[in-house]
Amino acid sequence: MSATKRGWTLSMTALTALALTACAPTPAPGGGSDAVATTITELDYYADEQGSAAWQKILDACSKQTGITIQRQTVPTAQMLPKVLQGASSRTLPHLLFTDNPTLQQVAATGALTPLTDYGIATDGYYESIIKAGTYQDKVYGLAPGVNGLALMYNKDLLTAAGVQPPTTWDELKAAATKLSGDGKYGLAFSALPSEEGTWQFLPFFWSNGADLAQLDSAKSAEALKYVTDLVNSGAASKSVVNWSQNDVADQFVAGNAAMMVNGSWNLARLDAEKALKYGVVPIPVPKAGGKPTVALGGEVGAIPASGGGTQQAAGKVLSCVLAEPTMVEWSKAHAYVPSKVDVAKKFGEQIPAMQAFIDEVGTARSRTAALGEKYPKVSAALAAALQSALTGQQPAEQALAQAQQASGS
């Protein structure tokens, strides 16, 4: 999931400790007889100042390590997929591409990408869900150095004053949000925009209840949508959630207008900057006690388009550097991401307790395109529309989802 992310500082002691335990993979020569090129082009959407600076630091380090000059191109997030699909059609893609993980399969379906095995890039040690996010027709075309996700963040002072414990189940979440609401303030804030942002925030409730994107109008789907709709109708969450972006949600939380929020790890730097704010982070509550939340994986994957042997091999060397464990840690600390390898993430969580809830969730997280592939964007748009329709009272949950199922064509 792409979002405006703020830099996050990890102590150099912690970073060094993690880096010393890691080693970089060495890519084996792949197909193609051309000599390895000395210059490649790279495309990403890290357009915000801090995110762009952090990514440039990664590229500069990998350029120095590999001896390959990297000519970087950056476009706004909304322009990324159209530009990539146009480039795929005309075979004018850059040599190295970093794109939002749900778009990977759509690009791979054009035939414009090359399998990462061509460059000796292995998937050993990665979370299975991260491998699936970069897989198309049983071949891995993209891998992420780190991923993000959603969790429940709460204001410790407000919960303590109300005698409320951080919720772990849907019943507890509703009870807590209800008790914490009143006088123009709300117990819970989340984003329900009619876009991928809204779908992304709803999926943990949808998937954790056993719903399936291939059957949007199932009873499990309706149960999840009714639950979220009831949070708004009961006053436990604001009706404005249909207009709030994830940044808006963070604004409400920081201002004390929401005691809890569903939001991403990239907000931790902002929360840390509020010295008077004491917050905690727990996994998103689940329907029944003992369950594990199923959140959607966010973050970007690196992919190598077909461009000729020499440039492809050069891009493979740079991508191997980006995926090396020290770089993985550097990128994760800059953006409050979870490192993509299980062992690296475990060490990261030991050093950064605020990240532990996000790390706990990655093991059961799900790639949005794992089952639907390039069909996902259409299904996502239909589900986001159903969410809006139900939350605004235009349609009951069952009717909104039946319409979504028809619109999705799945």
Image (cartoon, rainbow, N blue to C red):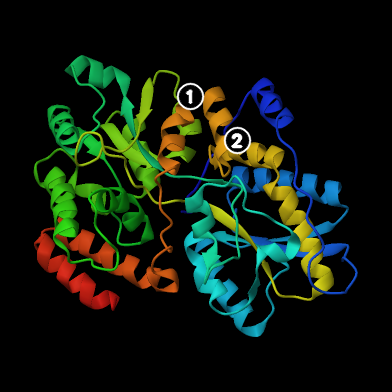
| Residue drawn 84% across the image and 70% down it | 310
- Residue found 22% across the figure and 48% down from its top: 240
Is label 1 in a helix, a strand or a loop? helix
- Could you tell me which residue is drawn at 25 percent across and 21 percent down? 158
Q: Residue 165's x, y, as percent?
A: 23, 21
Locate residue 101, reporting x and y percent: 51, 59
Sequence order check, earlier mark of 1 and 2: 2
- Residue highlighted by disc 1: 353
Other-residue count near label 1 (Cα within 10 Å), few / some / many at <14 / 14–19 / ≥20: few
State the count of labels. Answer: 2
Image quarter of the C terminus: bottom left
- Depth check, front residue: 384 or 183: 384
Using the rendered view, name the quadrant where residue 160 is placed.
Answer: top left
The dot on residue 344 is 2
Contact (Cβ within 8 Å) of mark 1 with mark 2: no
Q: Amino acid at mark 2?
A: Val
Q: In the drawing, does residue 299 fall left or right of residue 195?
A: right
The answer to whether residue 394 is visible is: no
Name the secondary structure under disc 2.
Answer: helix
Q: Quadrant of residue 335?
A: top right
Q: Residue at x 82, y 51 (%)?
A: 63
Residue 80 location, quadrant: bottom right
Disc 1 and disc 2: Cα gap in Å?
14 Å
Q: Position of residue 293 (x, y in %)?
A: 32, 42
**Which disc number belongs to residue 393?**
none
Q: Which mark is nearer the camera, 1 or 2? A: 2
* Nearest to the observer: residue 211 or residue 297: 211
**Amino acid found under the numbered disc labelled 1:** Pro
